[in-house]
Amino acid sequence: MEDYKRLLLNNKAWVKDRLSLREDYFQRMTEAQTPKYLWIGCSDSRVPAEDVTGTEPGEIFVHRNVANLVIHTDFNILSVLQYAIEVLQVEHVIVCGHYGCGGVKTAMSRKHLGLINKWLRHIKDVYRFHADELDGIADETVRLERLIELNVVEQVSHLAEISFVQQAWRNRRMPVLHGWIYDIHTGLLKDLIKIDPGQLPHNIYVYEFDD
Ligand code: CO
């Protein structure tokens, strides 16, 4: 059998399994979604958002890209964020990095892989901001793990710098911003940083609103 066909067969088995749990499983899914969480994770195939958080379809709104970056000129992530925050009114936004991240590892090296380097360049900036600390770590794996953590912290800060996040904080005291790390060795999530609504970033990023 061609390998990919296994996925289609799995799907049939999955449907059967879900229907055996609840007859109206899929009927319920046709109603509007009301997820409380937005997950911004890495595209890495080893970090499936729903599996590692034990969430069901309908519970978690997901955006994934290489190395879980929040880039202010990326219309893809900005659209996901604006829709999740203003329309779905999610209560929590989680940026989740993971140890062993190939994107961060490449950014820490001088490897040139083509277009992806333009994307990963943002992580080189994170390295530069923390060069004093990172250059002082002799063990390469430990240094990589630290950069993976610092990258998550930086991306969560980026969320707080977005105008419509600050607007949502003002209007409805939501969402709470979180930075987590998934440990691929143990399967455990580590709670790294939390930014509560109203905890504004550096002054230079704070907006004034007329309404
Ligand atoms: Co990764």
Image (spheres, rainbow, N blue to C red):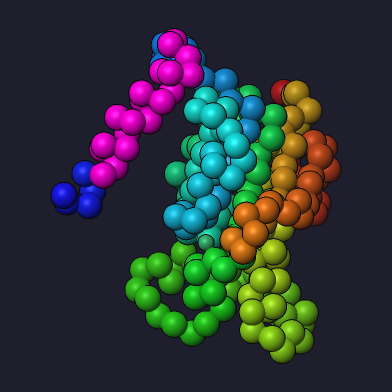
| Quadrant into which the C terminus falls | top right
Q: Is residue 7 left or right of residue 55?
A: left
Q: Find residue 126 and report its horizontal and vertical position in percent.
A: 65, 69
Q: Is residue 145 left or right of residue 7?
A: right
Q: Quadrant of residue 150?
A: bottom right
Q: Image point 43% across, 71% down: which residue?
A: 117
Q: Find residue 196 and report its horizontal and vertical position in percent.
A: 81, 39
In this view, the residue in front, 17 or 62, is: 17
Q: Find residue 188 and report its horizontal and vertical position in percent.
A: 67, 53
In this view, the residue in front, 115 or 62, is: 62
| Residue 13 magenta-highlighted | yes
Work out whether residue 126 can be spotted: yes
Query: Would you place residue 162 above or below residue 138 in this image?
Result: above
Give the magenta-colored segment's residue range.
Answer: 6-24
Work out whether residue 71 can be spotted: no
In this view, the residue in front, 100 or 89, is: 100
In terms of secondary structure, what is the magenta stretch mainly?
Answer: helix
Residue lying furthest left in this view? 1
The total of numbered circles placed on residues is 0
Q: Image point 54% across, 42% down: which residue?
A: 51
Q: Find residue 142 and report its horizontal and vertical position in percent.
A: 69, 78
Query: Would you place residue 119 above or below residue 139 in this image?
Result: above
| Residue 38 magenta-highlighted | no
Q: Image point 75% across, 24% down: which residue?
A: 171
Q: Image point 79% across, 46% down: which residue?
A: 194
